[in-house]
Image (spheres, grey):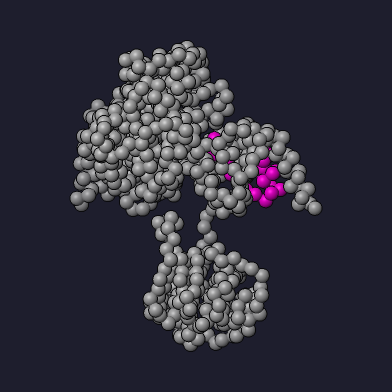
Amino acid sequence: MSAEEISFIEKYDLLGCIQCGRCTGGCPVSMRTHLNVRRFMYDTQNEERLEELSERPEIWDCTTCYTCAARCPKGLEPLEVLIGLRSLQIEEGRIQPTVRDALESIFKDGNPWGSPRAKRLDWVGDLDVKVLEPEAEEVTDVLLFVCCTDAYDPRVMKVAQSLVKVLQAAGVDFGIIGEDESCCGSEVRRLGEEGLFEMCDEENVELLNSFNVNRIVTISPHCYNTLKKEYHGLRHPVLHYTELVAQLLEDGKLTLNKEIGKVVTYHDPCFLGKQNSIYDEPRYIITRIPGVEFREFDRCRERSLCCEGGGGKMWVESESKAERLAEIRVTDAKEMGAEVIAVACPFCLLTLEDATKVRGIEEEMRVADILELLAEAL
Amino acid sequence: MKDIFVLMEHRRGELRDISLEMLCGASQLGGNVVAVLLGSGVDSFAEKAAGYADKVLYVDDPMFENYNSEAYQKALSALIKEHQPGLVLIGNTAQGVDMAPALAVELGAPLVTDIIALEMEGDKPKPTRQFYGGKLNAHMTLKDAGMYILTVREATFQVGEPTKSGEIVKVENPVKEEITYRKFVEYVEPEVGEVDITQSTMLVGVGRGIREDKNLPIVEELAKVLGADLAASRAVVDAGWLPPDRQVGISGKTVKPKLYLAVGISGAFQHVTGMKGSELIVAINKDPDAPIFSIADYGIVDDLFKVVPKLTEKIKELKGA
C-alpha cells in the first residue's frame, strides 16, 4: 500500500460510507448517464482499482452540484471522490482537448475562454467604472469581482453591465480590478487540476488582499463559493451580489419604478443555493420588482434541479444522448406558465437559454439574470 | 555561399507539400539549392523537385520505399559529409522531428526546430521560432558552425511556379549495412468518424435558425454544391439533428476552415470560440443584432429560407459555367 493510495481513502473518509445510496438516489445526472456515485464510494476503497475507475467516462458527467453531499447522512462529500479520480487522469496528462485548452487559457491569460487578458475590460464599454489601485489609501466600499464569463461572453456581459447600473443607481462606492483580474479557479479545481487551482488561490488571494476595500462582491456563485470557502488567507468578507442588492432594497437605497409585467420564476443555482444556502435574497429581490408575478418551480431551493453548467461541464460533453437537465427545466417553466426564468449565475443563464433554443421556445421563454430584470426596472 | 540541402519528404506515393515549400524558401536565400531525395522508383518526384532546385541528389533504393529514421539518418549523414552543405532544411513533420535531432547530434551541428521564418547573414542562418504558444517570436542567434540543421514548420514558405531545371544526379546508396534497429511495419489509419470537421477546408455551420430537422436538406444541398462539410451548433446537436462529431464550440470541436458559412447561427460565445479562427466567415441570419455578425467578414441579413436556395442556385450556375 503506497502513501498516495492511503491518502485517497483517508482524504475522502471512504470508510465512513454506509452505502445507503442517498447520494445516487438524489443525483440529478444519474437520470441521464451511467454515473452511480454510491458505487464509486465503494469501489474507490480498493486502491488497486483507482486507475481503472479514473478511466470511466462517467466521472466527467458529475456537475459537482453538491446534492449527493447535501443528502449524505454521514456528512461525506461523494462528489469530491469523482474530482479526485479526475485528478488522477489530469496528473497522467490524459485530458480531453477541450479541457486542456480551457486550463491552458487560464494559466496563460487568466480566463478559460481562450481570450486575451487585454480584452478583459471589453464588457465595460461606455460605462464609467473605477479601476482600483492596489494599496490605495482611500477605502472603496465594494470590490466587484467579475467572473470570466461575464467579462468575455457577449451575452453574459449584459449581466455585469446591469450590476454596474444597479450599483450606480444605489450610490454604492465600488471598483473593479481591471485587466489583472484572473479566473477564480472554481472550475479548475472541479476539473481535477489541483496544482493550477493552488496557483489561482495563492495569486488571487495576494491580489485581492492588496486592495483597500470593505468587501468583495461576486457576480457568479462559482466565484463566490471559491473565494468564500476555498481560498486561503483572504482578508475581505465575500458577498454574492444577491446579498448586497437585497440589503440595498431593504435599506431603501434602490428604487424600482418601471413595471416588468411578467410571470417570473427563479432557478436556484447550485453554488448559491445547495452549497451556500442563499435562497431568500434572490426571491426577495425578484418579488420587489414592480409588476412581477412570481411562481416557484416544483423543484426549488434545496431540491432545485441542476442546469449541468458547473463542475467543468461547460467544456465536457456527456456521452449520454438523453435530454439535458436544462431542457427539463425550461419545459417545466413553460408548463407552469412562466414567461421569464430568472437566474443568478452565468452558467445557468447560458445552459437554460441554450435549452430554450433546443426546445424551440426561445421566443416565448426568456432567460434573464435577476440583474437584467433589475436594471430594466430602474 | 555553401550549398543548401533540402530533404524531400514523401509518403505513400505522394511528394509532400513541405518539400516544395522548403525548396522555394531556400531559393530566396541565395546559394545552390540541392534537393535530397531518398526513395524507391520515385523518378517523378525527382523531376518535380528539379523544377525548384539547382540540383537533385537522388538515391534510388528499395531501402527508402518507406520512411525509416535509421536508414534516412545514415544516408543523409553520409551525403552531408561528402557534399559539405552549409545548411540542411528538413520539414518539421512527424518524419522530420523524428530524425533531425539525432542527425544533429551525430554531426555535431546546431539544430533549430519548428522555425517559421528564415534569413541569412552570410553562411549563417537567422531563424525565427515561436514561444508561449505563439505569443512571442524569438529571433535566434546561433553559434558559429560549419553547418546548421533547421526543421521548418509546414506552410512557412509559399510554393511558386517551377522556374528552375536542376540536374538530376542519381547517386549510389551510401548505406551499405543492413538496417536493424528500426523496421517499417505498416501504416495504421486513424479511426475517424464519417467526416473529421477539424480537417475540412470549407464548413457550412447550421444553427437553430433552421427551425426543424426536415429543413436540413436545403443546407445540405448548399454544402454539397460548395464542396463543404456540415457542422452544427450545440443546440442542433442537442436536438439530435446532426451527430455530436459535427458540434463546433467550446465543448465540441475547434475548427479553422478557409470558409465558415454560418447559417441560422446566432453566434453564442461558446460556438464562436470554436470557429473564430476561420479564415473567412460568412453569416446568414435574419436578426441584424445577432452576435455572429460581429465576427463575420460578410453577412447577409435575411431569412435563410430565402437566401440559402438562391445561393445554392447561384453557386451551381457559377460552377456550371
Residue B64 visible in the displayed image: no
Q: Residue at x 61, y 49 (%)?
A: B280
* Residue B263 highlighted magenta (yes or no): no
Picture coordinates of residue A236 (x, y %)?
A: 24, 32
Q: Residue at x 44, y 73 (%)?
A: B100
Q: Quadrant of residue A284?
A: top left
Up-down relation of residue B234 to residue B202 (above or below): above
Up-down relation of residue B253 to residue B107 (above or below): above
Picture coordinates of residue B82 (x, y %)?
A: 48, 87
Residue B270 visible in the displayed image: yes
Picture coordinates of residue A161 (x, y %)?
A: 44, 30
Range shown magenta: B217-235
Camera-side residue of B190 and A133: A133
Q: Residue at x 24, y 44 (%)?
A: A8
Q: Quadrant of residue B51?
A: bottom right
Camera-side residue of B236 and B139: B139
* Residue B223 highlighted magenta (yes or no): yes
Picture coordinates of residue B321 (x, y %)?
A: 80, 53
Q: Quadrant of residue A370?
A: top left
Q: Residue at x 23, y 48 (%)?
A: A5
* Tally of numbered tags: 0
Horizontally, is B31 left or right of A142 in the view?
right
Camera-side residue of A106 and A236: A236
Residue sticking out furthest to the front: A137
Residue sticking out furthest to the right: B321
